[in-house]
Amino acid sequence: MDELAHKYKVTKHVMTVYHDVFVRIMREKDGLDGNLIYLDGLLVAKAVGNVVKDMDRFAAFHLEDNNLPDRHKYAGFVAKWIAKEKPIQLKKTPPLNLTNEKLLGINAIFTVFVMASFLETRIPTEISRQLRYMFSFREEKGETLALIAYCCEQIAKAA
């Protein structure tokens, strides 16, 4: 897959998760006002550009010609860069009564949604909680996150 097509595919995936899943669930579950946040396209593009570079390097070193990384690798590398770039931004400073932990950790929550979107099973609740912490306060390698994604599927299948 050429670089432009690769970037388009990953960008479209992230945008779909944001618009079709994340905003709807956050609005229904937490009453989050869509007027407070937006997805910054430039930060998404920066994250996706870094994902594609990382994935190309990974594929060149680890995979045979013309093989693509699996969904776990995508889950890990996309999550790494989304967490790092924090593409969900506040449109304006919210009133103090609306400033809560969910709003402050919105990028970490979104990153878990993005990571989960590549998997065939749900991320277990306790692991999701740990991932939110990692995405808020730590910087993990894409390979480590890919392994966590794989393990999440194996845990769900074994249950």
Image (tube, helix red, strand yellow):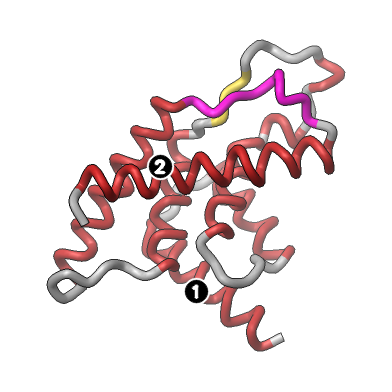
Q: Quadrant of the N terminus?
A: bottom left
Look at the picture and state if 28 lies above or below 36: below
Q: Main secondary structure of the magenta part?
A: loop
Residue at point 69%, 68% (across, down): 124
Residue at point 42%, 29% (across, down): 43
Circle 2 sits in a helix, a strand or a loop, which is it? helix
Q: Earlier in the sequence, mark 2 or mark 1?
A: 2
Give residue 155's position: percent from left, percent from top. 63, 80
Q: Which residues are magenta?
A: 32-40
Give residue 147's position: percent from left, percent from top. 45, 71
Give residue 85's position: percent from left, percent from top. 44, 34
Q: Is residue 39 magenta?
A: yes
Circle 1 sits in a helix, a strand or a loop, which is it? helix
Near mark 1 (Cα within 10 A), the count class, few <14, some 14-19 or many ≥20, is some
Which label number is shown at residue 150? 1
Q: Type of residue at label 1?
A: Tyr
Q: Type of residue at label 2?
A: Thr
When asked about the image quadrant of residue 24, the answer is: top right
Q: Is residue 21 magenta?
A: no
In this view, the residue in front, 92 or 33, is 33
Residue at point 78%, 30% (across, down): 32
Q: Quickly name the residue at label 2.
A: 11
Look at the picture and state if 19 lies above or below 151: above
When asked about the image quadrant of residue 146, the answer is: bottom left
Q: Quadrant of the C terminus?
A: bottom right
Which label number is shown at residue 5? none
Front of the two marks 2 and 1: 2
Give residue 113's position: percent from left, percent from top. 61, 51
Look at the picture and state if 53 lies above or below 149: above
